[in-house]
Amino acid sequence: MARRKYGNVQTEYNGRVYTSKLEADTAQRLDLLLCAADDAERVAEWTAEPARCRYRYGVLDKWPHYTFDFRVRWVKATAHHAEEELWECKGAWSQRDRQRLNFCRDWHVRNGTPLVVRVVYKDREEVLR
């Protein structure tokens, strides 16, 4: 598959082409979590690139968007994960991506619809609440 921005290699998994190998690996992991024996670790459903997350930016009344890689709904909320999370797969954060994600999260918190975002890296995960 073709190389893209930041050196990502498009990767196919289960009939869908993902923008990076990390995203395809994450989709495979989510499929495995659909079958987990323990309710606390089982995913009820997930979707790739769900609807765009819109937010108001600045005083100029701009409405940009942020598209997350996955929306994940767990069978049961625990101390480790919320009932619903938005997942973002990142090989490396650009300053612009981090700012846009923070603007999006902050806007939703101020408007009573807080987002729980899980950032998936190759070697670790980070939950932003």
Image (cartoon, rainbow, N blue to C red):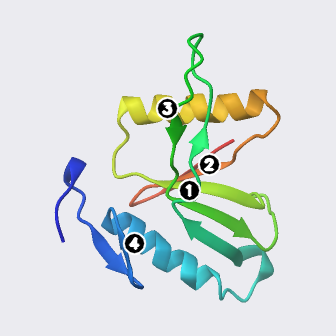
Q: Residues within 10 Å of mark 4 (few under 14, many from 20)?
A: many
As measured in the structure, the alpha-carbon distance from the residue carrying label 3 to the one carrying label 4 is 23 Å
Q: Nearer the viewer, mark 2 or mark 3?
A: 3
What is the quadrant of residue 47 in the picture?
A: bottom right
Task: Give the residue at mark 3.
Answer: 100
Q: Is residue 89 something one can see in this rendering?
A: yes
Taking the image as shown, residue 31 lies to the left or right of residue 76, namely: left
Task: Give the residue at mark 4.
Answer: 24
- The reply to whether dot 1 and dot 4 touch (C-beta < 8 Å) is no
As measured in the structure, the alpha-carbon distance from the residue carrying label 1 to the one carrying label 3 is 15 Å
* 1 or 3: tag closer to the N-terminus: 1
Q: Between residues 71 and 83, which one lies in front from this camera angle?
A: 71
Q: Is residue 81 something one can see in this rendering?
A: no
Q: Secondary structure at mark 3?
A: helix
* 1 or 4: tag closer to the N-terminus: 4
* Residue at the limit of the structure toward the top, as seen here: 59
Q: Residue at x 39, y 84 (%)?
A: 15
Task: Give the residue at mark 1.
Answer: 87
Q: 22 above or below 68? A: below
* 4 or 2: tag closer to the N-terminus: 4
Which three-letter amino acid code belongs to the residue tagged 4?
A: Ala
Q: 121 above or below 111? A: below
As measured in the structure, the alpha-carbon distance from the residue carrying label 1 to the one carrying label 4 is 13 Å
